[in-house]
Image (cartoon, rainbow, N blue to C red):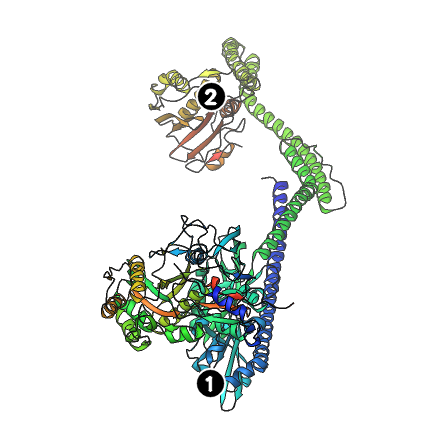
Amino acid sequence: MTFRTKLFVIFTLALVVSIGLVAVGVTTGARRAFNQLNTLHSEAFVAQFEREFQRSRQDVVHKVQGIADAEGTVRMAIDLSRPQADVSLYVNDAHGVAESHQLDFLDFVSSDGSIISSTEWPARFGYKMTWVTQPQNWAVVGSFLIKVDTQNGPALGVMAVSTVRVGDKNLYVVGGQRLGKDFLSTLVLPDGMRALLYQNLSPQFDAANLIDQTGPVFQGERFANFITQEQQHPAEQLFKISWTRDRASGEVFHALPLLGRQKELLGVLLVGSSQSQVVTLERQIRMLALEVVALGLLFGALMSWWGAARVTEPVQKLAEGARAVSEGNWNTRVDVRGPHEIAELGRSFNRMTQQLAEQRERLLQAERVAAWREVARRLAHELKNPLFPLQTTVENLQRAKEHHPEEFDEVFRESTSILLSEIQSLKDIINRFSDFSKMPQPELGTVNVNDIVRSAVKLFEPQFAALGRPPVTPELHLDDELPAIQGDGALLRRAIENLILNALDAMPAGGVLMLRTTQDDHDVHLEVSDTGTGLTAEECERLFTPYYTTKQHGTGLGLAIVQSIVSDHGGRIWVESEPGVGTSFHILLPVKASADGIPAPAAPQAPAVVETEKV
Amino acid sequence: MRLRLFPFLAAISIALAAAPAWTARRPRYGGTLRVEIGAIVNSLDPAIAAANPDEAAAKEQIDSLLYDHRDPDGRFTGGAGSGPFLISEWQPGKRLTLGANEDYSGGRAFVDSIDIQMGRTAADRLVALELDTADFAEIAPDEARNAAERGVRVSISKPDELIALVFVPGRPATQDARVREAISRSIDRSSIVNFILQKQGEPAGGLLPQWSSGTAFLFSTASDVITAKEISRQISSTTRIVVGYDLADTLEKAIAERIAVDAHEAGMSLTVEPMTGAPEKVDAQLVRLRMPSPSPRESLARFAAMLDRLAGLEATPIPDDAPVEQLYEAERSIVGSYRVVPLVWVPEVYGLSTRVKDWTTPQAGRAWPFADVWLEQRQQ
């Protein structure tokens, strides 16, 4: 991942997190506000219900009192106070009076508690309504909630009792209004709210007793647990019901117990607040937040990309400059403008590359001088050896001519022979230098390393068992599955011959020469090991330096040539050695050639032992 | 052959016209008797059966005005035009105008015509009587006292219609005779008479009224709530019993509701439902049994036949010469099964305008005596 991409991702993530936090905060805050609003609505509605309930109770009291004060009722009381009064005359009176006073329930009850006339249960005349006759100041009691028996079953009613006293007899007027769906329909509800009433008319929960302003509530059985709780412990409570899996279907209910005169639970008012609007608003806010996030992300991504590009462009230029420098383009300069730190870094980079180029130039000069000095030293050293005998021979000839003319001929023959020999040595030296300078480029073809190894070893077989020196035992461990490689067979054979020759020189007391080939990923691995004297670490470091040699008569060009051949094949060579134990040369040659015809460079491989690579 | 004495009395009355004390009572010919009834008669053809009991009763009354003779089986014969009135105008289901038959063998009726309006509600009929726009109208028994208090001239017959609770055979809820007994004992018949019927009628313990059989006092009419509760506890049935009543009959409805209250007090669950046809969904139903004649034997035979059909009874045939004891035994046998629970005897109540003279309340099973009344002429 590039620096620009990383910067872009970081900017974008920071933006996403920021916007996400804002969206979550807004959503959470909105939900909290809506819930508070719902609670306020619910409380307001409960207060409204209580006001309506109170008003309804007062209304009932007034109506019942009005009936009791009416002339017809007083006449009825007077008539019924007479001995042998005919009660049957009034059996149908309650219905008309109740209708005219808009009461759902009305009973005229005689002094002994017998029902004279009843609206809610007309056929119940003659039966007792004993609770009315209990000593009680009904005027003080006012209205109350009670379970009323009707011909259609029990019902909840807000009732009041008024007494008409004539002589020592009372006529009780018991009237009231049904607390049911009609009462619920009088309540003004805001959108999303509804009022339910559970009429506690049976010991166990009965869904049919849970009504709204239209009748029994759909899925009323879902309230069973909450109503049962109210039946056991009447108290205000809040609970929530989700009608479907959709959160918007949820409804929060505020339960308000309705108690009778004896504090018994007669009903439960349930004020439901639909979560639909809240959830819908939340979703709208969330959708808006998502749109803002999306737009923000888009804008942020563009800005991040622009910002990252603006920040990383000079860095990228610096990186490209550094890469060019690493590739050897020492004159690379970067164009980073502006007053900020990156520009300063660019200017520093330019100064650095300029200094590096100057230092490299100086170093090359020094190396060239050192190389020439080394060449001169080697040439002087190489040429000095044959020149000295030449000088001595010529001086011997001069001395023989001057002091021993009689021996001059013999001396001349011997001297010319020596001179020719030394001149030949000079020519050999010159030829080796010439060969090194004229190292040819490899001509690639399909070659088998095993074949080359076998051929090279065969060439040296006479020398392995040469007379006058301890034998050297060659051991070949060649991988039969070794793939062919793209390479120059002659050059590779020359390299292997140099390594074998080097090993023979390292084993003057004889030993074992081991050659091993193996396949290593996409490379062919050749190992040439001897059991010779071994090399020190310092020797290993300088081993491939041209003209460096540890041998008395070596030119120091053999291993340099090997390294050159391996390098030209895209391979690599390194040496492992331990003094007194032996030395191993490892060569990795790529199987396939690279696009430019040169075999692809062998991948670096960590050696199993201490490794000393070429310099 | 029916003898009509009124034409002769009318002649005498005319002869005594000079005597002021007799003037108001003197029969006069003429006038139209305005009759309002609740039933709707759609056909006067004797071959076409009435759609409901009300229509059948009204049709029977109209036939008694059109035909001269009534057979023992209740059908009127003698041919069309043989009765005291002839059809002048006929609007099926709405209105029937009858004219006096000048050739009637029993003598011409005093009124010239009878105008019968059908399908009038009880309230409309009562208002018409109060406003004096009707001369004759049926009044529900429970409205009799109210009508009288409102100044309407009321004519009440002897109680000749039995309202009874009949258990539908084969219903599991009432298959146990103890259930039926408990319901029967829980019913407060006196309250029904006093409150619902406004004291018009009698509690019924048997199938025949006291005035007809003379043995009705042997059947208990008092409620026995204690025994009813005891039986209810024993059977401890939770099955709800449904009592049906005629949808158009408010009196039946009130009585059914009272039965439900009484049963409820005795610990039984009983509900009421209106019926529009056959009692398919009810366990018991209220029925009205009108006496076909004052004769106890004839009435009991008719009742037994009807109850045999309604309650699945196998009543003992009642011979023509059955003595009172046998009638009583038959009556007791039917009532003792608790498949039929007599409730109340209800009279026929009629409202009359003050200009209707010489009205005689008809006996059970007898026709309205429109041919015998005359109308007082009033000065405008």
Residue drawn at (52%, 51%), measured in percent from left and top?
B90
The percent coordinates of residue A402 (x first, y second) are: 57, 13
Using the image, tell me which numbered label, if any, was put on residue A186.
none
Three-letter amino acid code at the position of disc 2: Ala
Q: Is residue A77 left or right of residue A152?
A: right
Residue farthest bottom in this picture:
A168
Relative depth, front residue between B123 and A601: B123
Picture quadrant where residue A436 is located: top right
**Mark-to-mark CA distance, 1 and 2:** 139 Å
Q: Is residue A130 left or right of residue A256?
A: left
Q: Percent from the top left, x then y, of residue A375?
A: 59, 25
Q: Residue at x 62, y 51 (%)?
A: A284
Mark 1, other Cα within 10 Å: few <14 / some 14–19 / many ≥20: many
Say what secondary structure mark 1 lies in. Answer: loop
List the residue tagged with mark 1: A111
Q: Residues within 10 Å of mark 2 (few under 14, many from 20)?
A: many
Disc number at residue A495? 2
Q: Nearer the viewer, residue A145 or A190?
A: A145
User: Is residue B296 something one can see in this rendering?
Assistant: yes
For the C terminus of chain A, the image quarter is top right
Relative to B109, does residue A330 appear above or below in the rendering?
Answer: above
Q: Position of residue A11 (x, y in %)?
A: 64, 47
Compare residues B213 and A81 and report the one nearer the observer. Answer: B213
